[in-house]
Image (cartoon, rainbow, N blue to C red):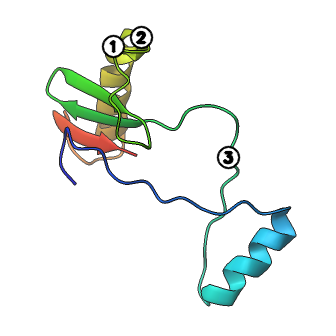
Amino acid sequence: VAVGQAVQAQRADRADDCEHAFNRMSKFHSGPFLIETKFDGWRIQLHRDGENIQYFSRNAIDHGALYGFTVFNDVIRTQVEQLTYFSGICRIVRVCVCV
């Protein structure tokens, strides 16, 4: 994983309902697993390197300025710094990738 290079996202097949998804996953995984609901909307990878923040789609397109995501830059910086501070990782994160 490298800042500024989009991570290839995993893509799952559609399931008819939760039971169908659970049964399919149980065939291949004997241990615990997680099933997430995909709500309508965007899945975005955030890449931060100092003050620079990039917003990649699952197809590795940087949508930051293209779709106006850059308006969130200050909020993202604050949230990442608070999250890492309160979780004890470190005081300030200057480089990170959030997927």
Q: Position of residue 6 (x, y in %)?
A: 29, 44
The reply to whether callout 1 and callout 2 are in contact (CB within 8 Å) is yes
- What residue appears at the point 17 percent right and 20 percent down from the top-left corner? 51
Disc 1 element: loop
Q: Position of residue 31 (x, y in %)?
A: 59, 86
Disc 2 element: loop
Gap in angstroms between the C-alphas marked 1 and 2: 5 Å
* Viewer-nearest residue: 29 or 58: 58
Q: Earlier in the sequence, mark 3 or mark 2?
A: 3
- What residue appears at the point 28 percent right and 27 percent down from the top-left corner? 54
Image height of 81 relative to 66, above or below: below
Label for residue 94? none
Residue pointed to by mark 1 = 65
Label for residue 38? 3
Disc 3 element: loop
Residue pointed to by mark 2 = 68
- What residue appears at the point 69 percent right and 88 percent down from the top-left corner? 27
Q: Is residue 49 toward the left or the right of residue 89 in the image?
A: left
Dot 3, how many residues are within 10 Å of its Cα: few (below 14), some (14-19), or many (20+)? few
Image height of 96 relative to 23, above or below: above
- What residue appears at the point 38 percent right and 24 percent down from the top-left corner? 63
